[in-house]
Structure formats: C-alpha cells, structure tokens
Image (spheres, coloured by chain):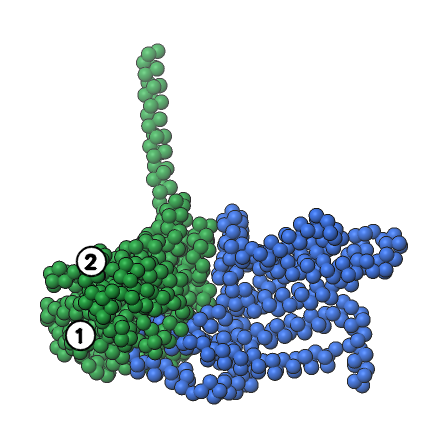
Chain colours: A blue, B green
C-alpha cells in the first residue's frame, strides 16, 4: 500500500506542472494585469507604469516568466503576492485552518442529512416517502447558497446570541456556514446512498442475515450499509476535496477567511503568483484527499486490501 | 391632638421630601456614562499592509491615520492644511524649499523620540524600498534633498517648485516612520508610528486590532482597543450590527437605508460624497472628438434620474468636472456666459446635436463600466439618449480588464468614479497627457499651460483665475460629463459617539467611544 501511495504522490508532479502551465496561460490571456489593477485604484504616469512593469517582471514573454516561476517552485518557493508582498505559501496556509474546518463541518452536515435520507429512501423505494426524501435532498441543492446563508443569518444568528453572524470566531461560528455549504451537497450524496443501498438491499446474504433473526435495523446498518459505503465514500471524499478549494459565495456571505475568496480576489486583481500558487496548493490538497479516500477503501473493504496485498506479492 | 397630627404630617412630608431628593439623585448617579474598552467596526474594503508607503487606498489611509502621523494634516472640515507633527512651516518664493518646525513632545510606539532624522529616514527608506507604492515613490522622487537642520527643524527641497506639495504630503501614505523600528524589523517596523493607536494584530482581509498609545502627543484616545472586522457582504455587515457584534457598519447597501432607519438602537448617517462619478469620452475615437456631440449628450442626460435609479437616491448632482471641495472650484456658469449641464435641457441638447457631425443622431456609442451599479447608470443613460436618436451599447468588464482597455485607449465612453482631493493641481491628472486617469485622452496646450502657471502662482486670486479658466474650457469642450457624487452611508449603534465620518470615506475613529 505504501508503494501505491508513493506512486500516486509522484503522479501529482505532472499534474502540478500541467495545472500551473494552464493557469499561467489563462491568466496571461485574460485582459489586464496587476498594473491595471493598480491603475484602477490611482492615477499613474507612464513612467510609473513602466517602473511597475519592471518591478513585477512583466516585460518578458509568458514562457520565460513561467520557467522563472517553475524555477522557484522547484526550490519550494511559490513566489510573493503582487498585492500584499507576502509569500504565497504563507498567505495560503493562513487561510487553510478556516477552510479545513468549514470543509469538514460541511461534509459532516451533508453526511448527517443525506445518509439517513438515502437509506430511508432505499428502504421505502417507490413510495411517497421515497419521493419526499429525494425532493428534500434536491431542495438543498436547488437553494442558492447566498440566499440560504442570508436567511440563516437573519432567522438564526439574529435570534440565537451565541451563534455569530460572520467571521471565524470559535466553533459556534462554523454552524451556519457549514449548514449553508452542507445542504448544497446533500442531493448528490443522498442519491448515491440510495442507489448504492438499493444494489445491496436485495442481496442474498442479507436474506440470510434476516433469516438468522437479526433485526431489520441491524441488517441495514451492519450488513447493508457497510457494503454500500464505497460509492458513498467516493462521493463524500470528492465533495470534501472540492470544499478544500473554498466556497466563494459562502465565504463572502459569512466573511469566512477561506481560500476560495483568496483565489477569486487574486484572479480579479490579476495577482498571478497568488493565483498559480493557490491553485497548485489546491491541486495538491485535492490529490492528497483523493489518495486518502482510495486508501480508505482498503480499510472498509477487505477485498480491496487483499488486492493491494496481491499487488505487493507480485512486485516481489 | 391636632398639633400632634400637624407635627406628624410635617415629619412625614419632610421625610418624603428627603426620600424624593434621594430618588432624584439616584438617576443622576446612574447617568454617569461608562464606556466599553473595545469598539468594533465592520468595514467592506480589503486591507493588505500596515506600512504607510506601500498603500494609498482610502481604507488603508484610515488605519494609517490612527497609527501614524504626517508632518501636516489636511482637514476635510475646513478644506485646509493644519499642523500635524510639524507645528509650523514656511516655503521659499519658488515653492521648492519647505521648512518645518517639528513638535518635540512626540514618541513612537516603540518609545523612541520623534526627531527630524525620522523625516529624513522615511524619505530615504520609501524612495528605495521595492514595496513602496508607485505614486508614493514618484512623489518622493520629486524631492531633491531632506536636510536635517536640528532635531526639531527639517528642510525638504524639491527638484521643481510645487505649490500643492503639502496637499500631497499630507496624505497618510507619507506618514513618518521610525529609523530604529524599521531597521530592527523591516516587516513590522513600518507599522510603528506616532499615532493615537498602535498596531496589535493584523490579519490581511480579516481583522485588524489596534491598542491605545497612552503617550500620544494629542492626548490619549478614549477607547482602549479598536477592532476592525472585514465583512465584505453589506447585508451580513448590517446583520452583525443588528446582532450587536459590531458597533459601526461602514457602507451599508443604499437599498437598505430605509430598513436601517426603522431599526431600534441604530442610526444612519449619510455623508455627502466626495467621489465623483462621470463619463469620459475617448477623443481618439473620431466620432467622439466633437465637442458639440459631447455637449448634446451632457445636456440630454438627467443626472438626478441616474442617482435615483442607480444609487437608490443617495447622492448629489454634479455640474462640473472639478471637486466642489477642491481648490479653485468654479460653478458660476451663468457668470461665465455658459449654461449649466443640469437640470436637463433637451432643447439645448438638440441645438448642439444639430451643430455636430451627427445632426440627426443615428450613431451608436459603446459605453463601458466595471461594476454592477454603473451598469444600472449606463442603462438609464441608454434610455435617456434615445431622445437624441443615439444608440448606446452597454459593456461591463472586470476592473483589470476595464483599465487595460482604457490604458490601451480602446474604449469609446467609460463611466467611472474618482476620489478627488483638495489640491487644485491634482486635477491635472484628468486633463493632461501621460496620466492614466486621463481616460478622455484629452490634450489641450492651453489647459496644460494654465496648470503649469497655477502650480507656481503665489497670488491666490490669480491662481483661482487660472483654475477658473481651465474649468470654463472643460465645460465648453466636455471631454468629461460629470454625473454625481455618491453619498457614503454609515450605520451605527446609538451608543457610539466621537467618530468622524466624512464624504471622502476616510473616517476618523481616534475619538470614538461606545457606551456600555
């Protein structure tokens, strides 16, 4: 399994090279650059703009700037922000705790809502209850984040004093943003849970468990759900990885200091080192989460663990 | 018996009066107001630095105003220069040599005493540091030498005479830094100033906490801690105020002003704005290089309708491309034999259109903006110009794309806002070549010459006259059409006092206090 993990980590290198080139290329194609952002804030003479071009090294071609950037990246230097002058990695890591907390809490909310909903729908397949559950989960997906966020602030935060309206100030402050992001994730996860459960609910081994006298609750939770977990974990893992990239609207509404808004603000101000650096870090963290999910399969499913073991024996 | 009753009555009355006195004293004792140790302000614009020379935006300057001092301050109340770290100053006849007498009771937050050497150091540091803002660097590069005469006297010698130098130099980005602090720590050192508050915690785009500097030369501030929270969404910011999490909500949505007025315990203050919104015509586009066409548009537009429709009625009509608070402002158009652009005059508009290259209209103009609310303004203009048979195509770009286009002079007409200052000479950036603010690509030898003359004219009346002549020329040629000054709203708890809010958006919280 260790070899597999190392192999996967090494595969991230071409991914990062590809992603960084693509972002560099797209940012170069976008109209305007950092100097235009500065000009939008204040008047400048032609000499001042030329001074800035030299300062930001914008006179060379895109390819030469890219290779210069990659030279720094090889040494672990993601560059400095054009706007703040701070190292990109430092700015990114500053935002990571809040991003991870929000991502984890959102997935938790999503799991708490969608898995029971999916299981119940599967058990009550084709009934009015099944349809209601699915409509409810879709409602979570259909409600715009910004609207739900504002409604939660107005209805909950203004009435429950211990829940703050905005900012990352203690665990209470994560409740509303997590509900906002989490409800948006429920539809996919609930439907996956439902279909995955439907696949296993009619399996013979469950009939055997029922025949043994196990309660329906135990049959479903102990024997059916465990076997239906792989697709659920795949989707939940993917959602968690996506959340690590930040949730721009939610971060804006709740003044949440996450990476999503950092990236969007950097794109708007054409802060190329910050955009490229953040996207590289985002790709890296998504890669790690996906790898973590793949490894988790082995923990849940002995067949996959056995597969890893066979692979190891073969390589010997 | 009657006597006894009378005595008892008198005693009862006397006792009653005594208690009544005590009761009336109780509220008086309760009236002694207590204030919170911390005032929390919610703001909407990102900040990225605590170092004055690196930033020039209004929000950064608000912080620098609290943490640092300049030699001279600009008072927006009186539109004049007032003493700061310099008690007095004088200038040579050619406006090149400025001599300052400095206060000798000022201490930096690290305990170092402020001297003339710090003025010299700030100049040397900022003009050489790579992080210095380009405009700030250009201003410092205009200085030939800073001569320290003694600890309390310093002389600044400019390469060329500039009568408006102090207006520029009073900007918070030119605050004085401390040599020892910056030399010891290049990252945090520039954040050490002489202002009423010290930088305590700074998390870019999240929050900034300032602590009172008890040795402040102007007297210690009333509130121990100021916390500024960055909440970008206006509705959330207002909700935070309503929930009591913040005491001041800067810049609530204009559309929410009526809701705020109905809120318990919350007040709304709308400052008359100092940011002018205007249209700029690219004179390098042949069709638009026609003053008659531009004047026709200027007289056909209804500015009040734009304020009502696009700014929820929060703003005031502008009739001149010159700040009403800027030195040399002139608006007696009738006295100059001209008609003001506003109120709308469709007949006059049609007269000018008839004299233009498009006497019957029939042209299409692309108008570009860079924000959602200016799209609204352009859509209103689009409807208004139908009266002249002029078709308007509305285009929206993001900020960098917008500036990239104006810099490359690829635009036709743009709508934009600009923060104007009190310095008359500062207006030259809109009307002289080589400035990115000159989005009209306007170039007039006469106007450039008048700006040059005004820059070195010591006689106030003559200088005012030069600026008047410029404004008359601009009014007749209309490279820009002024629209309005957007108002700036502030919602705050009724327990807040001492804050100064003005139209420039650079609010002063140095005296703010919040009742418990």
Nearer the camera: disc 1 or disc 2: 2
Instruction: Identify the residue at image location x=40%, y=51%.
Output: B256
Question: Looking at this view, is B468 or B228 the one in front?
Answer: B468
As helix, strand or loop, the secondary structure at mark 2 comes to helix
Q: Which chain is home to disc 2?
A: B
Dot 1: within a 10 Å radius of its alpha carbon, few (fewer than 14), some, or many (20 or more) residues? many
Kind of element beneath mark 1: helix
Q: Give the answer, above or below, for where B245 lies relative to B102.
A: above
Say which mark, if any, is on residue B347: 2
Q: Quadrant of the N terminus of chain A?
A: bottom right
Between B251 and B385, the one lying in front of the other is: B385
> Is B11 above or below relative to B510?
above
Is residue B246 positioned above or below B189 on the image?
above
* Mark-to-mark CA distance, 1 and 2: 29 Å
Q: In this picture, is B123 found above or below A262?
A: below
Front residue of this view, candidates B349 and B171: B349
Query: On the image, numbered disc 1 is attached to which residue?
Result: B447
Residue B134 image position (x, y, % from top left): 33, 78
- Residue B448 on image: x %, y %: 18, 77
Residue for point 25% across, 65% down: B360
Judge whether residue A57 can be spotted in this image.
Answer: yes
Which label is found at residue B123? none
Q: How many marks?
A: 2
Q: Position of residue B497 (x, y in %)?
A: 34, 52
- Judge from the rendering whether residue B240 lies leftward or rightward of residue A222; answer left or right: left
Q: Position of residue A3 (x, y in %)?
A: 73, 81
Q: Quadrant of residue B330?
A: bottom left
Q: Residue lying farthest top? A: B1
Residue at 37% of width from left, 57% of height from top?
A: B251
Q: Residue furthest right?
A: A212
Label 2, residues with CA under 10 Å away: few <14, some 14-19, many ≥20 = few
Q: Is residue A116 visible?
A: no
């Amino acid at each position: 399994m260790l070899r597999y993990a190392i192999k996967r980590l090494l595969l991230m290198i071409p991914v990062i090279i590809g992603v960084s080139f693509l972002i560099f290329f797209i940012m170069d194609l976008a109209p305007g650059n950092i100097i235009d952002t500065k000009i939008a804030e204040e008047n400048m003479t032609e000499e001042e703009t030329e001074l800035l071009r030299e300062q930001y090294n914008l006179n060379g071609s895109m390819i030469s700037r890219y290779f210069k950037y990659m030279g720094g990246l090889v040494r672990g230097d993601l560059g400095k922000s054009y706007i703040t002058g701070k190292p990109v990695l430092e700015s990114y890591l500053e935002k990571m705790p809040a991003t991870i907390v929000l991502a984890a809490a959102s997935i938790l909310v999503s799991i708490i809502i969608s898995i029971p909903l999916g299981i119940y729908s599967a058990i009550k397949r084709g009934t009015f209850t099944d349809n209601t559950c699915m409509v409810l989960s879709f409602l979570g997906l259909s409600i715009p984040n910004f609207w739900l966020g504002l409604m939660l602030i107005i209805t909950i935060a203004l009435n429950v004093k211990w829940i703050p309206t905005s900012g990352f100030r203690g665990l209470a402050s994560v409740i509303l943003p997590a509900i906002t992001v989490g409800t948006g994730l429920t539809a996919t996860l609930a439907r996956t849970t439902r279909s995955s459960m439907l696949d296993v609910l009619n399996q013979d081994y469950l009939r055997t468990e029922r025949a043994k006298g196990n309660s329906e609750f135990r049959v479903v939770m102990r024997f059916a759900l465990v076997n239906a977990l792989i697709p659920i974990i795949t989707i939940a893992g993917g959602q968690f990885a996506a959340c690590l990239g930040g949730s721009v609207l939610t971060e804006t509404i709740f003044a949440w200091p996450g990476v999503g808004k950092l990236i969007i603000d950097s794109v708007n101000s054409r802060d190329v080192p910050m955009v490229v650096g953040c996207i590289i870090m985002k790709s890296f963290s998504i890669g790690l989460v996906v790898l973590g999910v793949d490894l988790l399969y082995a923990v849940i499913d002995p067949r996959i663990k056995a597969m890893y073991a066979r692979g190891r024996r073969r390589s010997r | 018996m009657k006597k006894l009753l009378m005595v008892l009555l008198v005693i009862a009355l006397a006792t009653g009066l005594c208690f009544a006195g005590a009761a009336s004293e109780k509220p008086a004792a309760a009236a002694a107001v207590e204030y919170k140790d911390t005032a929390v302000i919610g703001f909407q614009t990102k900040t990225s630095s605590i170092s004055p020379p690196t930033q020039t935006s209004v929000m950064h300057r608000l912080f620098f105003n609290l943490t640092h001092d300049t030699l001279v301050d600009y008072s927006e109340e009186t539109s004049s220069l007032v003493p700061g770290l310099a008690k007095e100053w004088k200038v040579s006849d050619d406006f090149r040599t400025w001599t300052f007498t400095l206060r000798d009771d000022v201490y930096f937050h690290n305990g170092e005493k402020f001297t003339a050497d710090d003025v010299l150091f700030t100049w040397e540091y900022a003009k050489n540091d790579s992080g210095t803002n380009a405009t700030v660097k250009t201003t410092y590069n205009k200085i030939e030498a800073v001569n320290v005469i003694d600890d309390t006297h310093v002389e600044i010698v400019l390469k060329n005479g500039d009568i408006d130098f102090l207006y520029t130099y009073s900007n918070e980005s030119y605050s004085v830094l401390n040599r020892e602090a910056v030399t010891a720590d290049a990252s945090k050192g520039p954040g050490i100033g002489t202002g009423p508050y010290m930088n305590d915690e700074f998390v870019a785009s999240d929050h900034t906490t300032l602590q009172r500097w008890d040795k402040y030369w102007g007297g210690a501030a009333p509130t121990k801690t100021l916390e500024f929270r960055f909440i970008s969404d206006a509705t959330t910011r207002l909700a935070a105020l309503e929930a009591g999490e913040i005491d001041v909500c800067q810049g609530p949505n204009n559309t929410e002003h009526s809701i705020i007025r109905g809120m318990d315990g919350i007040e709304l203050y709308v400052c008359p704005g100092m940011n002018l919104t205007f249209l700029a015509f690219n004179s390098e586009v042949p069709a638009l290089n026609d003053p008659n066409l531009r004047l026709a548009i200027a007289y056909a537009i209804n500015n009040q309708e734009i304020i009502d429709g696009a700014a929820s009625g929060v703003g005031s009509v502008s009739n001149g491309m010159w700040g009403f608070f800027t030195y040399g402002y002139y608006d007696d158009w009738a006295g100059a034999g001209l008609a003001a652009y506003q109120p709308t005059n469709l007949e006059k508009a049609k007269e000018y259109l008839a004299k233009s290259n498009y006497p019957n209209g029939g042209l299409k103009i692309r108008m570009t903006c860079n924000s959602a609310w200016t799209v609204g303004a352009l859509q209103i203009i689009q409807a208004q110009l139908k009266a002249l048979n002029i078709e308007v195509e509305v285009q929206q770009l993001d900020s960098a794309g917008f500036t990239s286009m104006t810099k490359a002079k690829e635009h036709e007409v743009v709508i934009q806002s600009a923060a104007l200052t009190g310095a008359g000479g500062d207006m030259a950036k809109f009307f002289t070549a080589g400035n990115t603010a000159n989005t009209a690509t306007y170039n007039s030898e006469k106007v450039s010459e008048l700006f040059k003359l005004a820059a070195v004219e010591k006689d106030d009346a003559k200088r005012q006259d030069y600026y008047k002549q410029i404004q008359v020329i601009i009014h007749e040629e209309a490279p820009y059409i002024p629209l309005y000054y957007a108002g700036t709203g502030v919602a705050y708890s009724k327990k807040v006092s001492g804050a100064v809010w003005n139209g420039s958006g650079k609010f002063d919280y140095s005296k703010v206090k919040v009742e418990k």
